Amino acid sequence: MRLPGRLSAAIEVLNDIEQRKRPVADALKDWGLSHRFAGSGDRAAIGNIVYDALRKKLSNAHIAGGNTGRHLALATLVREWGETPESLNAQFEGDKFAPEPVSEKEAAMLTRANPLADAPLHVQADIPEWCQNSFERNFDEEWVDEGVALASRPPVDLRVNTLKSNRDKVLKALKRVKPVATEIALSGVRMPAGTRDSRTPNVQAEEGFQKGWYEIQDEGSQIVSDLIFARPGEKVLDLCAGAGGKSLAMSAAMENKGQIFAYDSDRKRLSAIFERIKRAGTRNIQVRQPEDGSLDDLLDSMDKVVVDAPCTGSGTWRRRPDAKWRLSREQLDVRLQEQEEVLSQAISFVKVGGFLVYITCSVFPEENEGQIYAFLDENPSFELVSAGEVWQDLFGFDKPQPWSSDLKSITLTPGTTGTDGFYFAVMQRNA
Ligand SMILES: C[S@@+](CC[C@H](N)C(=O)[O-])C[C@H]1O[C@@H](n2cnc3c(N)ncnc32)[C@H](O)[C@@H]1O
């Protein structure tokens, strides 16, 4: 397939997503199943148009003057893929899979100067209007830029598993896909985002992955895992372990010494952890299933309790742009309630002198500072400690700096640290 056919397919998928309110991955998969003639390069290119179009859905619609699949996809190709109405029409000619030619009216809309100058700010930032207030509060006058950064294509990041390999070895093994060392995270490797129809490297198909040399993990997630500062010999409870991303990173930081207890209230979410533990060669993670009393022996005894809290995931909108447009105020309220609950459960496991670590992959202050300050008000035996010292010890002074509203807890963002959005706070139990 050439670009015109890929464009037609992307338009079809975008319309399907909009009309049937479908997750983007499902819509793309279905398209692939019903068009088996399409090769993997075609699928990747169609996926790229669809994801690019959705990341900037509001601004694309503003530029193109409408929000159908065709509007969004044409705006994407002209704005980001370096095409023009003329270059598109020239390619459409004689291609039986091409969409309708770009009309004069469409061309005039797509090529006007400064097309976003008259757009509302949340449209320029490509965020839902109801989120504007949270962004403004979090990022002051830089909130539009942060929204724009959250609407860019993300890189693929890997965390090198230092229990089995090292960064140089992984860089060498993956040379073909041009990896670079991450700028901040200690054991990270990055494949920068490509342009146009470039394909995401399938790093899971590599021998190194099967051997447990690395895991796919965004650099932001690696940085917060580094900042937990889990040391060899410690006892750590990962209370919201899910598939184990943070547990596995901590296990390597602890050099397989000490004990991590990986728990999640959702048994299904834990299921992937077993295979990952095996592949990583990890021996210090004990999985605790959600059963009555399954954590009773851990009360008041943990050096660290990590709450990688359920959240809106607004920090990961680069990777899940459809989630950005689906998210509602009501869903945010549900997450806030869950965060409060899990924080109150976490308290009882922290030993006196131990630390409670709170992490989200959200950039909403309600889920972050708001949650932590309410917790500290209710729990005077906990004190917020600065993540800055550990940051400097681990990463030095010369790295991109994260946001911090209180100079203690930190927020990573695509705009500042070039990562997904994450919030990180550490509290010490004093009594
Ligand atoms: C952000 S995800 C965890 C991601 C995981 N730590 C990782 O790095 O891959 C949040 C997890 O919290 C779990 N969860 C929600 N409420 C919980 C609770 N009260 N106790 C324990 N886990 C909870 C969810 O099931 C979900 O798996």
Image: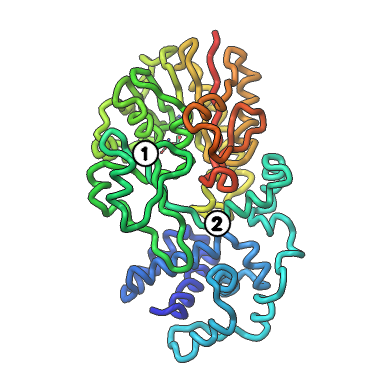
Q: In this figure, what is the number of numbered marks?
A: 2
Within-10-Å neighbours for mark 2: few <14, some 14–19, many 20+: some
**Outermost residue, front direction?**
398
Question: Which quarter of the rendered picture does the C terminus lie within?
Answer: top right
Tell me the quadrant of the picture where the N terminus can be found.
Answer: bottom left
Q: Tell me: residue 31, above or below residue 244.
A: below
- Image coords of residue 129 (percent x, y): 69, 53
Q: Quick one: SS at disc 1?
A: loop
Residue to which mark 1 is pinned: 243
| Amino acid, disc 2 | Ser
Query: Residue 161: x percent and y percent?
Result: 31, 37
Specify few, some or many for label 1: CA neighbours under 10 Å numbering under 14, 14-19, or 20 or more. many
Residue 285 vertical placement versus 123 (above, below):
above
* Ligand 1 contact, mark 1 (Cβ < 8 Å): yes
Residue 48 in picture, x, y percent from top left: 46, 65
Q: Which mark is residue 297?
A: none
Q: Percent from the top left, x then y, of residue 6?
A: 44, 75
* Label 1–label 2 contact, CB within 8 A: no
Identify the residue under disc 2.
152
Q: Nearer the viewer, residue 166 or 380?
A: 166
Front-most of 93 and 314?
A: 93
Task: Give how far apart the Cα atoms at labels 1 and 2 are.
Answer: 26 Å
| Residue 205 in the image: above or below residue 363 | below
Task: Tell me what residue is drawn at x 64 percent, y 25 percent.
Answer: 373
Image quadrant where residue 380 sits: top right
For label 2, the SS is: loop
Labels 1 and 2: the sequence-earlier one: 2
Q: Relative to residue 272, is residue 368 drawn left or right?
A: right
Residue at position x 68%, y 59% in the image: 123
Which residue type does callout 1 highlight?
Ala
| Residue 222 sits in quarter | top left
